[in-house]
Amino acid sequence: MTSQAVVVAVVVTYNRRELLQTTLAGIAAGTRVPDAVVVVDNASTDGTAGYLRDYQGPLVTDVVTLNTNVGGAGGFVVGMERALLDHGADHVWIMDDDTEPQPAALAEALDVSSAYEKETGDTPAFIASRVVWTDGRDHPMNRMRPRLGASEEARSAAARVGATQIRSASFVSVLIRADEIRKHGLPIADYFIWNDDLEYTARVSRKGKALTTQASVANHHTKVFGDAGADPGPRFYYEVRNKLWVYTRSSALAPWEKILFTGASLRNWARTIAASPNRKVLLGGLLKGLRHGFKAPRSNAEVLEGIYALRNVQEPAS
């Protein structure tokens, strides 16, 4: 009889205490509860630290409080390393603090992973949940498309276990095998916010299998129902800079994918700017992002120096 796989959830939070409570309640209500939950508090100032200090819920929590906000990207670097090295995770289940996993989310992801391995003899790198908004509609910000170029055999194998083969996913309820993290390294902390999930999941899945399943569901509690094209204001800088890093500095995408994705990004940026009442702000972010995007991101050790000392998980390959 084999022992049950160790699953460690990683939740990154910043100044959203009430949403974090919903996230932890969703995890605790699962039909399969993770063995531990690592919560990375990005130097919140809204009482999150006190809430986590006094947490009396049913989950085994390991709280990492940073003294500086290093964004979602930096928080996931810290949390994922902690899950592997301190908790011996076999799978790391990652999500932001505006994610509310539904009761079967983790159990179904694990079942699909196991079923696919039995069906094909291959282990999927990660399983992504279906992501819906608060009213149950598929969230356009987290919509995953079938992998381009996947063979009919690969598509059929995924379908037989109730899944679809994909190329990338957002960090909203993604179950990643620990061996894949050890193999491919951690996310890139210098991304701060946005596109760190695209780069990371595409890096992990480029030569592996990644799946999504409709049976595993998570709610994404964003303020509005929309995709990344919704007016981002000053944060447009991160969208531009980070996409440029993905296309020019990362090995996550094949050359033909970089061409395809670059064209799509240019089109989307033009639409976003044209539809915005704050065009000056977005144009400023565009120019600054293009300028900074030509300089390589800093190493994780540089970004997290004095905040958190990384130990044994490798840096991502350039």
Image (spheres, rainbow, N blue to C red):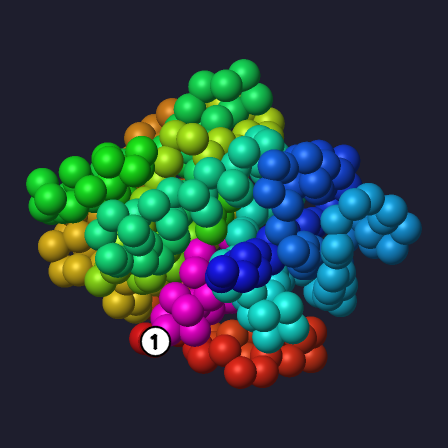
Q: Residue at x 46, y 65 (%)?
A: 178
Residue 232 appears at what percent x and percent y?
49, 37
The reply, left or right, for residue 237 in relation to residue 95 is left
Does residue 104 appear anywhere in the picture?
yes
Badge 1, how many Cα within 10 Å: few under 14, some, many 20+?
A: some
Residue 282 appears at what percent x and percent y?
44, 41
Tell me if residue 44 comes above or below residue 272 in the rendering.
Answer: below
Q: Residue at x 44, y 77 (%)?
A: 315
The reply to whether the magenta stretch includes residue 26 is no
Please name the amino acid that badge 1 sits on: Ala
Tell me if residue 25 comes above or below residue 53 in the rendering.
Answer: above
- Tally the marks: 1
Q: Residue at x 70, y 40 (%)?
A: 28
Query: Residue 38 versus residue 300: which sits nearer the camera?
Result: 38
For disc 1, the marked residue is 317
Residue 189 appears at what percent x and percent y?
51, 66
Does residue 247 appear anywhere in the picture?
no
The reply, left or right, for residue 249 in relation to residue 1 is left
Local secondary structure at mark 1: loop
In the rendered view of the protein, which quadrant contains the C terminus?
Answer: bottom left
Q: Quadrant of residue 8?
A: bottom right
The reply to whether the magenta stretch includes residue 184 is yes
Q: Quadrant of residue 111?
A: top left
Query: What are the residue bounds of the magenta stretch?
Result: 176-193
Q: Residue at x 39, y 59 (%)?
A: 200
In the current view of this chain or complex, which residue is farthest to the bottom?
312
Residue 235 appears at what percent x and percent y?
51, 46
